Amino acid sequence: MCGEYTAGLFGHSEKRIHCAIQEAMTRGLNLAAVSRAESELAKLVCDRFPSIDLVRFTNSGTEANLMALTVARQFTGRDTIMAFHGGYHGGVLLFTSDGPSAVTVPFPFIMAQYNDANAAENLVLAHRDKLAAVIVEPMLGSGGGIPADVTFLEALRRATAQTGTLLIFDEVMTSRMSHGGLQKRLSITPDLTTLGKYIAGGMSFGAFGGKAEVMSLFDGRLPHAGTFNNNVMSMAAGRVALDEVFTAEVADALYERGEQLRKDLNARLARAGVAMHFTGVGSVATVHFRNATVRSPYAPTSNDDSLRELFFLDMLKAGFYLARRGMLALSLVIEQIDLDRFVEAVEEFAILRQRFLRPISAAA
């Protein structure tokens, strides 16, 4: 149920992807040139996502976000980035409740509260002369599986358009929410989009793309090096993954299965009367040991940490492996019988461990 933190969308043994990788390897592991698979995958990505006119490949979502921020600074001639508390954009782009982590790259950042539309819009307007980009996850991933309010994202779109600031959607996790990502499902189009995780069929992958006028800076003005950006295995796997496996119909079906799973889980927990619920969007969800519904990230207490650890271990004992932080990400190979068993296991946890869980009325 961990789903390799959303990268394992296809499970571990998708035969079509395995065959594509094996066939590609017969023609050579390292080819320092543009390949047919690369151009075909690029077209698939551009055709899917409303915001992407041109795309460039990287080896990870982290790299994709770094490059997107860099091109935004060059395009606007400004240097400051707005990010959100609880946001995660890669190993060197993570933000806590206090601001940038100690390992976050030293760009000048302005921090804002997630899902506070008025405050964020006012910050964009107040810093219009120095703000190059606003980077936001349409659903906080490691920050707690917290979906963005549509009004929040619309406020960001409105303010950035007014000030000439580039709006970047980090859809490394949320691109699975439809054939064209969460941006397509919500009908909100950013200036740049970053991708990663499952798109190359489980191989190492990242991508960033957007408006042609922005991305064309790489046609001579900005360099973009990377020995493995277009590695043959990721390109071959990604082409099959997007074209043959994760079709629009499959994406919609997975989204609906995830939505129903979260409803079923929360209904059972409400019936148990415990302060425990799942947030998320579509096929990604995260557990919280608090009253419903969490809308912004929070600093976990020692009690939160203990309950998450207990939940992880109890689920493991019941036969379900999820992320230790309480996140689950459905893969295409998980069957309904597995989901039904998981719902039962979660309800059993709520009943068995009720003495450690606060009642709904008493939760923070």
Image (cartoon, rainbow, N blue to C red):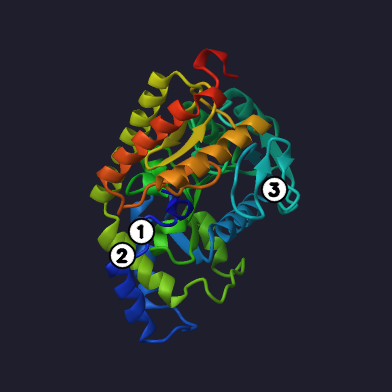
Q: Nearer the viewer, residue 359 or 38?
A: 359
Q: Amino acid at mark 2?
A: Glu
| Numbered label attached to residue 78 | 3
Q: Amino acid at mark 1?
A: Gly
Closer to the camera: disc 2 or disc 3?
2
Spatial CA distance of label 2 from label 3 is 45 Å
Q: Residue at x 36, y 69 (%)?
A: 237
Viewed as shown, does residue 76 lie left or right of 6? right
Q: Secondary structure at mark 3?
A: loop
Closer to the camera: disc 1 or disc 3?
1
Residue 264 image offset from top left, x and y in percent = 33, 30
Q: Secondary structure at mark 1?
A: loop
Residue 343 image offset from top left, x and y in percent = 35, 35
Residue 174 image offset from top left, x and y in percent = 44, 45
Spatial CA distance of label 1 from label 2 is 6 Å
105 up-or-down from 113: above or below: below
| Numbered label attached to residue 11 | 1
195 up-or-down from 18: above or below: above
Spatial CA distance of label 1 from label 3 is 42 Å
Q: Residue at x 54, y 57 (%)?
A: 61
Residue 76 image offset from top left, x and y in percent = 63, 49
| Numbered label attached to residue 14 | 2
Viewed as shown, does residue 63 lie left or right of 202? right
Viewed as shown, does residue 172 lie left or right of 302? left
Q: Are marks 1 and 2 in contact (CB under 8 Å)?
A: yes
Q: Residue furthest left?
A: 249
